[in-house]
Amino acid sequence: MIEFKQVSKHFPPDIAALSEVSFSIGRGELVFLAGPSGAGKSTILKMIAAMERPSSGQILVNGQDMAQLKSASLPYFRRNLGLILQDHNLLQDRSVIANVMLPLLISGASNAEALIRANAALEKMQLADKADSYPPALSGGEQQRVAIARAIVNRPQLILADEPTAYLDRDNARQVMNALQTFQAAGVTCIISCHDEDFLAQANRVIYLNHGQQSQTWPTAA
Protein backbone atom coordinates (compact mmCIF):
# COMPACT_ATOMS: atom_id res chain seq x y z
CA MET A 1 0.00 0.00 0.00
CA ILE A 2 2.88 2.38 0.80
CA GLU A 3 6.38 2.40 -0.59
CA PHE A 4 9.27 4.77 0.14
CA LYS A 5 12.15 4.56 -2.32
CA GLN A 6 15.33 6.35 -1.24
CA VAL A 7 13.30 9.27 0.11
CA SER A 8 15.05 12.37 1.43
CA LYS A 9 13.55 15.58 2.78
CA HIS A 10 15.40 18.84 3.38
CA PHE A 11 14.09 22.02 4.93
CA PRO A 12 15.73 25.47 4.54
CA PRO A 13 18.38 26.50 5.13
CA ASP A 14 20.00 23.05 5.16
CA ILE A 15 18.15 20.76 7.56
CA ALA A 16 18.06 17.08 6.58
CA ALA A 17 14.81 15.70 8.02
CA LEU A 18 15.13 12.38 6.16
CA SER A 19 18.03 10.79 4.30
CA GLU A 20 17.43 8.06 1.71
CA VAL A 21 14.73 6.20 3.64
CA SER A 22 13.29 3.07 2.01
CA PHE A 23 10.53 0.75 3.24
CA SER A 24 7.24 -0.77 2.14
CA ILE A 25 4.02 -1.31 4.12
CA GLY A 26 1.35 -3.78 3.01
CA ARG A 27 -2.39 -3.29 3.15
CA GLY A 28 -3.80 -4.02 6.60
CA GLU A 29 -0.46 -3.81 8.43
CA LEU A 30 0.08 -2.04 11.74
CA VAL A 31 3.52 -0.45 11.75
CA PHE A 32 5.19 1.71 14.39
CA LEU A 33 7.64 4.51 13.63
CA ALA A 34 10.07 4.85 16.52
CA GLY A 35 12.90 7.20 17.39
CA PRO A 36 13.78 10.28 19.44
CA SER A 37 12.42 13.75 18.83
CA GLY A 38 13.63 15.03 15.46
CA ALA A 39 14.19 11.53 14.07
CA GLY A 40 11.86 12.14 11.10
CA LYS A 41 8.72 10.28 12.23
CA SER A 42 6.32 13.19 11.76
CA THR A 43 7.91 14.06 8.42
CA ILE A 44 7.17 10.56 7.12
CA LEU A 45 3.54 10.78 8.20
CA LYS A 46 3.12 14.22 6.64
CA MET A 47 4.60 13.03 3.36
CA ILE A 48 2.24 10.03 3.25
CA ALA A 49 -0.62 12.49 3.82
CA ALA A 50 0.74 14.78 1.07
CA MET A 51 1.23 17.59 3.57
CA GLU A 52 4.92 17.62 2.60
CA ARG A 53 6.62 16.55 -0.62
CA PRO A 54 9.95 14.68 -0.83
CA SER A 55 13.09 16.54 -1.85
CA SER A 56 14.25 13.40 -3.67
CA GLY A 57 13.23 9.78 -4.03
CA GLN A 58 9.75 8.40 -4.63
CA ILE A 59 6.69 7.81 -2.42
CA LEU A 60 3.89 5.57 -3.66
CA VAL A 61 0.54 5.32 -1.86
CA ASN A 62 -1.89 2.86 -3.45
CA GLY A 63 0.24 3.10 -6.58
CA GLN A 64 -0.06 6.90 -6.67
CA ASP A 65 3.23 8.78 -6.97
CA MET A 66 2.82 11.46 -4.31
CA ALA A 67 5.11 13.88 -6.14
CA GLN A 68 2.66 13.79 -9.07
CA LEU A 69 -0.50 14.22 -6.97
CA LYS A 70 -2.21 17.43 -8.06
CA SER A 71 -3.72 19.87 -5.57
CA ALA A 72 -7.18 19.31 -7.05
CA SER A 73 -6.90 15.59 -6.21
CA LEU A 74 -5.96 16.09 -2.56
CA PRO A 75 -9.51 16.19 -1.12
CA TYR A 76 -10.39 12.90 -2.82
CA PHE A 77 -7.10 11.30 -1.70
CA ARG A 78 -7.61 12.36 1.91
CA ARG A 79 -11.12 10.91 2.10
CA ASN A 80 -9.44 7.52 2.46
CA LEU A 81 -7.11 8.83 5.14
CA GLY A 82 -7.58 9.21 8.89
CA LEU A 83 -5.06 11.60 10.44
CA ILE A 84 -4.53 11.77 14.22
CA LEU A 85 -2.15 14.45 15.45
CA GLN A 86 -0.68 15.23 18.89
CA ASP A 87 -2.60 18.50 18.77
CA HIS A 88 -6.01 17.06 17.99
CA ASN A 89 -7.39 20.44 16.82
CA LEU A 90 -10.91 19.92 18.09
CA LEU A 91 -13.17 22.93 17.63
CA GLN A 92 -13.69 24.15 21.17
CA ASP A 93 -16.96 25.96 20.43
CA ARG A 94 -18.66 22.93 18.88
CA SER A 95 -20.02 19.85 20.57
CA VAL A 96 -18.27 16.50 20.36
CA ILE A 97 -20.83 15.17 17.89
CA ALA A 98 -20.44 18.29 15.71
CA ASN A 99 -16.65 17.82 15.67
CA VAL A 100 -16.97 14.22 14.55
CA MET A 101 -19.61 15.01 11.92
CA LEU A 102 -17.49 17.72 10.30
CA PRO A 103 -15.39 15.55 7.90
CA LEU A 104 -18.55 13.91 6.58
CA LEU A 105 -20.32 17.23 6.02
CA ILE A 106 -17.26 18.59 4.21
CA SER A 107 -17.23 15.54 1.92
CA GLY A 108 -20.90 16.08 1.01
CA ALA A 109 -22.79 13.71 3.31
CA SER A 110 -26.26 14.74 4.43
CA ASN A 111 -26.72 15.96 7.98
CA ALA A 112 -28.80 12.84 8.81
CA GLU A 113 -26.16 10.42 7.47
CA ALA A 114 -23.35 12.35 9.19
CA LEU A 115 -25.20 12.20 12.51
CA ILE A 116 -25.73 8.44 12.29
CA ARG A 117 -22.13 7.70 11.36
CA ALA A 118 -20.68 10.13 13.91
CA ASN A 119 -22.71 8.51 16.68
CA ALA A 120 -21.47 5.08 15.55
CA ALA A 121 -17.85 6.31 15.64
CA LEU A 122 -18.31 7.69 19.16
CA GLU A 123 -19.89 4.40 20.21
CA LYS A 124 -16.78 2.55 18.99
CA MET A 125 -14.63 4.87 21.11
CA GLN A 126 -16.93 4.42 24.15
CA LEU A 127 -17.86 8.10 24.08
CA ALA A 128 -21.55 7.97 23.15
CA ASP A 129 -22.45 9.63 26.44
CA LYS A 130 -20.19 12.60 25.60
CA ALA A 131 -21.83 13.46 22.25
CA ASP A 132 -23.38 16.70 23.50
CA SER A 133 -20.40 17.75 25.61
CA TYR A 134 -17.84 20.32 24.49
CA PRO A 135 -14.10 19.56 24.25
CA PRO A 136 -13.05 21.78 27.21
CA ALA A 137 -15.20 19.60 29.50
CA LEU A 138 -13.36 16.41 28.49
CA SER A 139 -10.17 14.89 29.83
CA GLY A 140 -7.09 14.69 27.62
CA GLY A 141 -7.71 11.02 26.97
CA GLU A 142 -11.33 11.65 26.02
CA GLN A 143 -10.34 14.44 23.66
CA GLN A 144 -7.83 12.16 21.95
CA ARG A 145 -10.49 9.48 21.53
CA VAL A 146 -12.83 12.10 20.01
CA ALA A 147 -10.02 12.91 17.57
CA ILE A 148 -9.80 9.21 16.68
CA ALA A 149 -13.58 9.03 16.19
CA ARG A 150 -13.32 12.01 13.83
CA ALA A 151 -10.44 10.32 11.98
CA ILE A 152 -12.31 7.06 11.42
CA VAL A 153 -15.79 8.45 10.68
CA ASN A 154 -15.03 8.45 6.93
CA ARG A 155 -14.11 4.73 7.18
CA PRO A 156 -10.56 5.32 5.92
CA GLN A 157 -8.32 2.68 4.37
CA LEU A 158 -5.32 4.21 6.14
CA ILE A 159 -4.83 5.73 9.61
CA LEU A 160 -1.77 7.88 10.38
CA ALA A 161 -1.30 8.60 14.09
CA ASP A 162 1.44 10.96 15.27
CA GLU A 163 2.31 10.18 18.92
CA PRO A 164 -1.36 9.59 19.81
CA THR A 165 -0.50 8.59 23.40
CA ALA A 166 2.17 11.22 24.08
CA TYR A 167 0.34 13.19 26.79
CA LEU A 168 -1.90 10.48 28.19
CA ASP A 169 -1.69 8.43 31.36
CA ARG A 170 -1.14 4.69 31.02
CA ASP A 171 -4.83 3.70 31.11
CA ASN A 172 -5.89 6.26 28.51
CA ALA A 173 -2.87 5.45 26.36
CA ARG A 174 -3.79 1.77 26.37
CA GLN A 175 -7.40 2.58 25.41
CA VAL A 176 -6.20 4.63 22.44
CA MET A 177 -3.74 1.95 21.33
CA ASN A 178 -6.35 -0.80 21.72
CA ALA A 179 -8.72 1.18 19.51
CA LEU A 180 -6.10 1.52 16.78
CA GLN A 181 -5.33 -2.20 16.97
CA THR A 182 -9.06 -2.94 16.60
CA PHE A 183 -9.20 -0.92 13.38
CA GLN A 184 -6.13 -2.74 12.06
CA ALA A 185 -7.78 -6.07 12.85
CA ALA A 186 -10.70 -4.94 10.65
CA GLY A 187 -8.32 -4.41 7.71
CA VAL A 188 -7.32 -0.76 8.11
CA THR A 189 -3.64 0.01 7.55
CA CYS A 190 -2.28 1.83 10.62
CA ILE A 191 1.02 3.71 10.89
CA ILE A 192 1.73 5.00 14.37
CA SER A 193 4.55 7.27 15.50
CA CYS A 194 5.40 6.21 19.04
CA HIS A 195 8.13 6.68 21.65
CA ASP A 196 6.68 4.37 24.32
CA GLU A 197 8.98 1.37 24.66
CA ASP A 198 6.26 -0.72 26.35
CA PHE A 199 4.06 -0.49 23.26
CA LEU A 200 7.00 -0.96 20.90
CA ALA A 201 8.03 -4.14 22.72
CA GLN A 202 4.64 -5.66 21.80
CA ALA A 203 4.68 -4.48 18.18
CA ASN A 204 4.86 -6.90 15.26
CA ARG A 205 6.81 -4.40 13.18
CA VAL A 206 8.79 -1.27 14.00
CA ILE A 207 10.67 1.09 11.66
CA TYR A 208 13.39 2.76 13.72
CA LEU A 209 14.70 6.21 12.83
CA ASN A 210 17.53 8.34 14.16
CA HIS A 211 18.47 11.79 12.78
CA GLY A 212 16.45 11.10 9.64
CA GLN A 213 18.08 7.77 8.90
CA GLN A 214 16.86 4.23 9.35
CA SER A 215 18.31 2.33 12.26
CA GLN A 216 18.28 -1.37 13.16
CA THR A 217 17.54 -0.86 16.84
CA TRP A 218 15.87 1.56 19.25
CA PRO A 219 18.02 4.69 18.61
CA THR A 220 18.10 5.97 22.20
CA ALA A 221 19.68 2.70 23.36
CA ALA A 222 22.86 3.35 21.39
Image: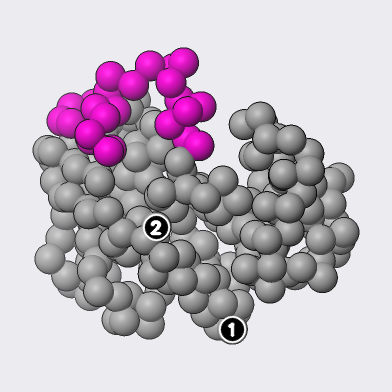
Quick check: 89 left or right of 59?
right
Above or below, comparing residue 156 to residue 217 in the picture:
above
At horizontal 73% and vertical 69% (from top left) the residue drawn is 127
Q: Magenta span has 58? A: yes
Mark 2, secondary structure of its residue:
loop
Question: Residue 189 at what x, y percent from top left?
Answer: 35, 56
Between 83 and 73, the residue placed more toward the observer is 73
- As shown in the figure, which amino acid type bears the numbered disc 2? Val
Question: Residue 220 at what x, y percent from top left?
Answer: 27, 70
Which mark is drawn over residue 188?
Answer: 2
Above or below, comparing residue 210 to residue 50 in the picture:
below
Question: Residue 188 at what x, y percent from top left?
Answer: 39, 57
Q: Classify mark 1: residues with Cα within 10 Å, few (<14), some (14-19) or many (20+).
A: few
Between 108 and 4, the residue placed more toward the observer is 108
Mark 1, secondary structure of its residue:
helix
Quick check: 150 left or right of 199?
right
At horizontal 55% and vertical 53% (from top left) the residue drawn is 152
Residue 49 visible:
yes
Labels 2 & 1 near each other (Cβ < 8 A): no
Task: Please name the colour scheme applied to the rendered image.
Answer: one colour
At horizontal 24% and vertical 66% (from top left) the residue drawn is 206
- In the image, the segment drawn in magenta is 55-79
Residue 33 visible:
no
Question: Residue 208 at what x, y percent from top left?
Answer: 22, 62
Q: Magenta span has 191? A: no
Which mark is drawn over residue 52?
Answer: none
At horizontal 47% and vertical 28% (from top left) the residue drawn is 76
- As shown in the figure, which amino acid type bears the numbered disc 1? Asp
Q: Disc 2 and disc 1: Cα gap in Å?
A: 24 Å
Number of numbered discs overlaid on the protein picture: 2
Q: Which residue is mark 1?
A: 171
